[in-house]
Image (cartoon, rainbow, N blue to C red):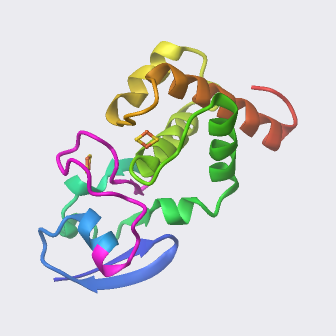
Amino acid sequence: MTIGFTLNHENVKVQTAPDTRLIDLLRERFSLIGAKAGCLAGGCGACSVIFNRRVTKSCLIPAFRVQDSAIITLEGFAKTDAYKDIITGFAAAGVATCGYCDSGKILTMEAILAKKPRPSSRKEILAELRGIRCRCTEPESLAAAVLAIADIRQRRLYGRRA
Ligand code: FES
Ligand code: FES
């Protein structure tokens, strides 16, 4: 089948089998390798993309569901100020980045802050972080990073703290 969708804000078309995983389409047909093929079972978040404005595991999305959708990968998101906030927040909270977990970690941070720009409860943040796996960072440090990023973003947007 031929599917058409927007990928990092550009209209694209690709011919593929309807059950091809989105992660494979992105990596093999569009050379977008920011999303990683980790567990391929929805458990690690390494393959995360923004799919119709929601952070989604691309290993679970078959090609037929991609028709007319809007997808942003880590490569597309990396061009935004929002991405810079996250990287600055990671540095402030001592959170490492790596090729394996970046898509899940970075896009999930964005999803948390999109839902609640000033998160107050660590418990709530920790619940949101359950879908991603970073082998070298404690969830508590990731929660601290979310709060640091919220602060950085509020200052960038409004010149004040969260
Ligand atoms: S590769 Fe998709 S969740 Fe692990
Ligand atoms: S920094 Fe990537 S697995 Fe921990």
- Above or below: residue 26 compared with residue 96: below
Split into 4 quadrants, where in the image is the C terminus? top right
Q: Which residues are magenta?
A: 28-53
- Above or below: residue 107 compared with residue 11: above
Quadrant of res 52: bottom left
Quadrant of res 28: bottom left
Q: Position of residue 4 (x, y in %)?
A: 32, 79
Split into 4 quadrants, where in the image is the N terminus? bottom left
91 or 117, nearer to the observer: 91
Residue 30 among magenta residues: yes
Q: Which residue lies at the image location 37% right of the left edge and 34% below the top edge?
A: 135
Residue 26 among magenta residues: no
* Farthest front residue in view: 136
18 vs 161, left or right, is left
Q: Position of residue 108 (x, y in %)?
A: 46, 41
- Above or below: residue 101 compared with residue 77: above
* Farthest right residue in view: 159
- Above or below: residue 4 compared with residue 22: below
10 or 40, nearer to the observer: 40
Q: Which residue lies at the image location 44% right of the left edge and 72% below the top edge?
A: 7
Q: Position of residue 9 (x, y in %)?
A: 52, 72
Q: Main secondary structure of the magenta part?
A: loop
Q: Which residue lies at the image location 70% right of the left edge and 42% below the top edge?
A: 88
140 vs 21, left or right, is right
113 vs 21, left or right, is right
Q: Which residue lies at the image location 26% right of the left edge and 65% below the top edge?
A: 22
Q: Position of residue 120 (x, y in %)?
A: 60, 16
- Marks counted in the figure total 0
